[in-house]
């Protein structure tokens, strides 16, 4: 829809230009206001198949997500799998069916390692072997397979440059690339907060939860794009990091609507990872986080280079105040 709007705008601009060719004064006005290209963003989901959240069964969650992809015409979301979860999670029995439903809805599948290790805590060899075990599953997935690795915890080796480079070389040797994210709103933490609140028997204001989820991610997108424009001098094709959560099952439709309202075009994962940014190999003292954060750090851009709400203390205070209506400092 947004794409169509862009084309229409461009056509109108062209027609207007053609019509006013004889009027020099008007041409300069038109030429100074070219049609604004939409900001572009692809949706990615980590930890698939993820464990149970606070509200939905895994089947319900998948059915809702698929319906959202359909009703919102979402092109090609990408799902980063931990194949080990398929057999080792209590809710994993129907996981292959759920994954197949995402593929049928136009999704593609990529690697989030087999067992979700933190690269800073394991050797490069162990990490690469874990990737290979996930690849063995993913390569059975036909045309839906993509050779992309999403680093668990966005940890690319932390302070250990030798390890970072060994894994970068290992990915290249396998014909794989970093399935980086450029925008992150720590949705996993909000999911965790909701689970904890539910367990504690607290009343959850679902409208406030939806609003906080949408606002947190839309603001993160705005922050990420602003940072990218400063770091790259342009707005790249972005990749939004989400997880396969109940938050997404319940509120992703609202988030997509809000992003579009804010001028974003939802694009497919193939288009996002075709951005020249995929060739970047930022060299920073601690390799972790989104691609944009790393590039901004490498270029020594002025702070802030990190989205405020990715600090869980900030995020949890907002959750307590707005979703649980707890007075700050009064609760446990
Ligand atoms: Zn993960």
Image: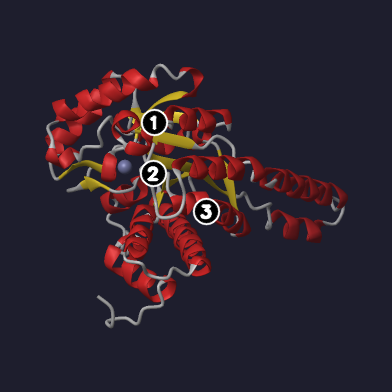
Give the left or right position of residue 2, taking residue 19 as reference.
left
Q: CA distance from mark 1 to mark 3?
A: 22 Å
Residue wearing tag 1: 93
Give the left or right position of residue 2, taking residue 248 as reference.
right
Please tell me which residue is depicted at 35% across the width and 52% down the height of the picture: 188
- Mark 1, Cα crowd under 10 Å, few <14 / some 14-19 / many 20+, is few
**Which mark is in front, 1 or 2?**
1
Residue 234 seen by the camera = no
**Which mark is in front, 1 or 3?**
1
Residue wearing tag 3: 250
Give the left or right position of residue 212, taking residue 38 as reference.
left
Please tell me which residue is depicted at 32% across the width and 59% down the height of the picture: 306
Q: Quadrant of ligand 1?
A: top left
- 161 and 92: which one is in front? 92
Residue wearing tag 2: 181
Circle 2 SS class = loop
Image height of 331 relative to 147, above or below: below
Q: Quadrant of residue 105?
A: top right
- Mark 3, Cα crowd under 10 Å, few <14 / some 14-19 / many 20+, is some
- Mark 2, Cα crowd under 10 Å, few <14 / some 14-19 / many 20+, is many
Please tell me which residue is depicted at 15% across the width and 30% down the height of the picture: 124
Circle 3 SS class = helix
CB contact under 8 Å: marks 1 and 2: no
- The quarter of the rendered structure image containing the N terminus is top right
Residue 10 in percent (x, y) is at 73, 46
- 68 and 199: which one is in front? 199
């Amino acid at each position: 829809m947004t794409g169509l709007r862009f084309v229409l705008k461009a056509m109108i601009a062209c027609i207007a230009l053609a019509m006013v060719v004889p009027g020099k004064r008007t041409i300069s006005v038109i030429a100074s206001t070219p049609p604004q290209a939409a900001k572009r963003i692809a949706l990615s989901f980590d930890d698939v198949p993820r464990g149970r959240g606070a509200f939905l069964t895994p089947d319900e969650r998948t059915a809702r997500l698929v319906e959202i992809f359909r009703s919102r015409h979402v092109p090609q979301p990408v799902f980063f799998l931990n194949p080990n979860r398929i057999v080792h999670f209590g809710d994993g029995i129907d996981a292959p069916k759920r994954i197949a439903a995402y593929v049928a809805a136009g999704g593609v599948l990529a690697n989030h390692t087999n067992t979700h290790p933190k690269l800073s805590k394991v050797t490069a060899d162990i990490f690469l072997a874990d990737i290979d075990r996930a690849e063995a599953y993913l390569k059975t997935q036909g045309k839906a397979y993509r050779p992309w690795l999403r680093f668990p915890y966005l940890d690319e080796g932390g302070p250990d440059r030798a390890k970072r480079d060994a894994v970068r070389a290992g990915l290249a040797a396998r014909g794989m690339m970093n399935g980086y994210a450029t925008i992150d709103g720590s949705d996993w933490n909000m999911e965790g907060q909701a689970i904890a609140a539910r367990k504690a028997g607290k009343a959850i204001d679902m409208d406030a939860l939806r609003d906080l989820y949408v606002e947190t991610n839309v603001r993160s997108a705005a922050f990420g794009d602003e940072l990218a424009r400063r770091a790259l001098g342009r707005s790249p094709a972005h990749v939004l990091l989400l997880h396969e959560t109940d938050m997404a099952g319940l509120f992703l439709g609202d988030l997509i609507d809000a992003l579009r309202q804010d001028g974003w075009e939802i694009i497919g994962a193939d288009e996002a990872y075709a951005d020249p940014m995929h060739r970047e190999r930022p060299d920073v003292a601690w390799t972790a986080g989104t691609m944009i954060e790393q590039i901004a750090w490498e270029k020594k851009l002025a702070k802030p280079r990190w989205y405020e709400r990715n600090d869980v203390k900030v995020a949890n205070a907002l959750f307590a105040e707005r979703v649980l209506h707890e007075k700050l400092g009064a609760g446990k």
